[in-house]
């Protein structure tokens, strides 16, 4: 039987609509609109496309935004100086530096130079650490978006075996923490985290009630690797050459959609699954930052 589609585009639009209303309520109280500052280095088309989507979403929900475009040859010190300006700027609520960075820069050093109270990506060690101990924090947008999809579609995680393929700091690691925590209204799952060194991947994926794939490897998971009825969340967004498309490429996930959707009960498409949720959750975090809801001061 063909899987049901988890429509991230629809859920993201509901969340953005809610944020838009909340922003309106906030400004109606006499507050200035929230402001998100993006920083993007170099000319990577995918990075510019993602940041463009974030800026368009800001405009739609009434969040002020700006993108600082910097050369990919910028020094670590120059970048830190730029970030410090926004850390100190009272009119900037959220700061994001689009990843990946050029190879001469250390992502952790750059992330640590962002004021954690403005870290709407939820990547700063302060936010990651507080997530791990169940304290209020900015939650990384993609995993938080995955949890929202579970909520919207009433997909229970409690007691389920969730297998996550991919252990990145952006998706796999924080999602594993969120899903395995026993407090809060999400989580309480048994989580297995697989990565590129996992031996016999199928031994793990075949046992999943819920399979989250965030490995950045097109077609990594195929039908025979999963059990009948599994929920599949495909976080992968891979550009592959497509001479039939105007752009010369198309986007595909980490699952072989055809064979996997024949066995799964639910599946996120790519595009239109998890991607739009990341942007919607960023809007939510930026509003939280403006309201100083996580870190009052
Ligand atoms: N690169 C891929 N995903 C993300 C994200 O959520 N935030 C930032 N800043 N960079 C990314």
Image (cartoon, rainbow, N blue to C red):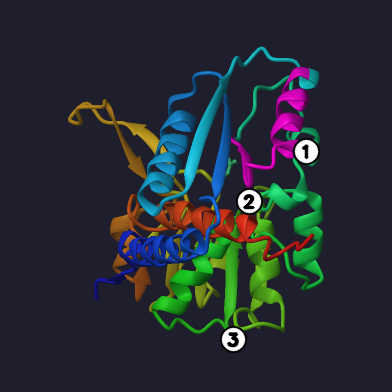
Tell which circle, 1 or 3, labels the residue nearer the N-terminal end. 1
Q: Is residue 264 visible?
A: no
Q: Is residue 230 visible?
A: yes
Residue 294's quadrant in the figure?
bottom right
Location of residue 12 with respect to 187 vertically, above or below:
above
Q: Is 107 contained in the magenta span?
A: no
Q: In the image, what residue occupies the spot 76% across and 63% down?
A: 296
* Circle 1 crowding by C-alpha within 10 Å: few under 14, some 14–19, many from 20: few
Per the model, the C-alpha gap separating discs 3 and 2 is 27 Å
Q: Residue at x 74, y 52 (%)?
A: 117
Q: Which residue is mark 3?
A: 158
Instruction: Name the quadrant of the N terminus.
Output: bottom left
Residue stretch in magenta:
78-98
Task: Identify the residue position indicated by label 1 in the image.
Answer: 108
Image coords of residue 88 (percent x, y): 75, 37
Q: Which mark is residue 120?
A: 2
Give coordinates of residue 253: x percent, y percent.
40, 49
Q: Residue at x 43, y 47 (%)?
A: 58
């Amino acid at each position: 039987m063909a899987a049901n589609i988890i429509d991230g585009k629809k859920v993201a639009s509901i969340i953005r609509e809610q944020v838009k209303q909340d922003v309106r309520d906030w400004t109606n109280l006499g507050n200035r609109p929230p402001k998100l500052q993006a920083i993007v280095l170099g000319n990577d088309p995918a990075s510019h496309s993602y940041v463009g989507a974030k800026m368009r979403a800001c405009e739609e929900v009434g969040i002020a935004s700006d993108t600082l475009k910097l050369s990919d040859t910028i020094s670590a010190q120059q970048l830190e100086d730029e970030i410090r300006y926004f850390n100190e700027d009272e009119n900037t609520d959220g700061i994001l530096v689009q990843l990946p960075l050029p190879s001469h820069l250390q992502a952790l050093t750059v992330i640590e130079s962002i004021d954690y109270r403005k870290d709407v990506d939820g990547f700063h060690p302060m936010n990651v650490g507080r997530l791990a101990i169940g304290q209020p924090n900015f939650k990384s947008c993609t995993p938080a978006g995955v949890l929202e999809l579970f909520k919207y579609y009433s997909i229970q995680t409690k007691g389920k075996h969730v297998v996550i393929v991919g252990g990145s700091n952006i998706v796999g690691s924080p999602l594993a923490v969120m899903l395995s925590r026993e407090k809060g209204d999400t989580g309480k799952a048994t989580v297995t985290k697989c990565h590129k060194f996992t031996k016999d991947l199928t031994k793990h994926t075949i046992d999943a009630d819920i399979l989250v794939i965030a490995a950045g490897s097109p077609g990594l998971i195929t039908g025979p690797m999963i059990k009948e009825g599994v929920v599949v969340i495909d976080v992968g967004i891979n550009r592959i050459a497509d001479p039939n498309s105007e752009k010369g490429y198309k986007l595909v996930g980490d699952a072989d959609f055809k064979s996997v959707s024949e066995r799964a009960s639910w599946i996120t498409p790519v595009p239109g699954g998890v991607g739009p949720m990341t942007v919607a959750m960023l809007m939510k975090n930026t509003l939280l930052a403006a309201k100083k809801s996580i870190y009052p001061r």
